[in-house]
Image (tube, grey):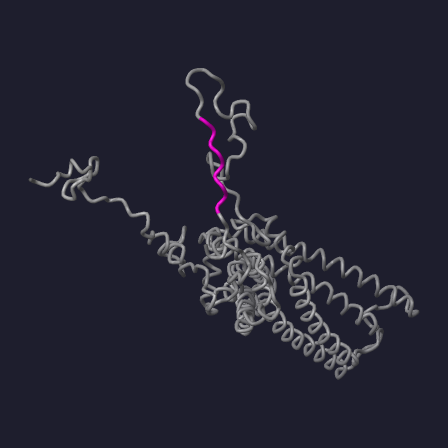
Amino acid sequence: MSGPSSGETGEPSPAEPTPGASSEPSSEPSASSPDTSSAATSSGGTSPGAGPDDPTPPHGTPAATQVPAWDPGPGAGPPQTPPPTPPQAPPPAPGYGGPGPGYGGPGYGGPPAGTPPGAFGMPPRAPRPGIVPLRPLGLGEVIDGAMGYIRAHPRVVLGTSAVVAVVTQLVQLVLTLVLGASTPPPGTSPDLATLTAVVGGSAVTQLVTAIVTLVAVGVLTGILMVTISRAVLGAPVDAGEVWRAARPRVPGVIGLSLLVGLIVAGILLVGAVPGLLLLLVDGTLGGVVIALGVIAAVVVAVWVGVSLSLATPAYVLEGVGIGEALRRSWFLVRGRFWPVLGTQVVGTIIVLAVTAAFSFVLALVGVVASVGAGGGLGASPTASPAVLVIGAIVGIIASTVTQPFQAGITGLLYVDQRMRREGFDIELQRASSGGS
């Protein structure tokens, strides 16, 4: 007696295909296989808007072992659980039972209440784990973020800025008091030796102050850029950890700032040289050429300066060299020159307004001190050591507030341009959610 057939047992035969299944291999990719093209894009290999003519390929989020600035650290952002699926409304009965969805509801034709973000074509709201939303930023958001990271971490930001301001102002004050002692009294004609001493003392004061300021601001800039990167992700900021992350980049920040300054100064010098040479032949023609050359040089210097203005955050946060940082800044600003310039101009106006307010206070204190000393309203308030000390204190307060704000503008412009050109907001969202 033969055994039961496959049809009798109810189990399909392995050799027979199941009904409705195609014998041809499927051309659709498996859901479990990773998308290699999107992975390459998210890792920084390619980016929207980057073509073969780009001076440098865009960088993704650096690894924590390479540049720890973008590492949110433990506890910065726990993995987010997906929101619960809202209950589905039952389908309407056939016929003319009533108006369709949205008619007479909230917004007249809009999505019904309780609709999750992203449904019905609505763009999802960008997450904001830190000082700014993780999407391309507007002018107001950049300004608000530059103030927000100061409010979020005042001890690190204002404390470091105050130390730098005290050092620079103290050096300038000591040199002014020591080397300014040879200044002749008002109303007298100085001899050649006295005049030489005054000019030499002023030159030494300016040179030493410039060197100290360059080094101190380089240290401050490195610390502030790392702090901004943490504040964008809403990560905790520890002074020691920030310093360990910024310390290896401080010498390069100083060299980068000096290099950009020399480039801008060289452009201005080149614009004035033809007119200076013509002065030997014709004074009038030489003056006209100098004016035209300087105007053209100023335009070129502004263009180059803005194009290289994002080199410092790129150098600190991406772990690249100085030359690569300059190319990165040029790449990020290209095509966005006017928005970047406009944001920087607005930030500069705010800084100048704050500085002018403090300068007015200094001038008022100087006049009061001169009148109190019996010098009258016509006396020079800068001749009093007490006024110099008060001026140093006012300068410390002004620098403590304005330098972090300027650094915040630059750092957030860098983040904004990367989000616009390289989709960096996706990387930041992944980092803020714990890498999920």
Q: Please tell me which residue is depicted at 64% across the width and 56% down the height of the picture.
A: 348
Magenta segment: does it hold 88? Answer: yes
Considering the image in quadrants, where does the N terminus appear? top left
Image position of 285 with respect to 84: above or below: below
Image position of 285 with respect to 92: above or below: below
Res 298 seen here: no
Task: Specify whether 397 is left or right of 80.
Answer: right
Residue 187 at what x, y percent from top left?
85, 73
Residue 70 at what x, y percent from top left?
51, 62
Farthest bottom residue in view: 193
Res 354 seen here: yes
Farthest left residue in view: 1
Q: Nearer the viewer, residue 273 or 26?
A: 26
Magenta segment: does it hold 204? Answer: no
Residue 53 at what x, y percent from top left?
37, 57
Image position of 113 with respect to 424: above or below: above
Residue 359 at what x, y percent from top left?
76, 61
Considering the image in quadrants, where does the C terminus appear? bottom left
Quadrant of res 153: bottom right
Q: Please tell me which residue is depicted at 62% across the width and 52% down the height of the picture.
A: 143
Image position of 231 with respect to 125: above or below: below
Q: Of helix, strand and loop, which mostly describes the magenta segment?
A: loop
Give the residues in magenta: 82-90
Q: Please tell me which residue is depicted at 68% across the width and 67% down the height of the picture.
A: 159
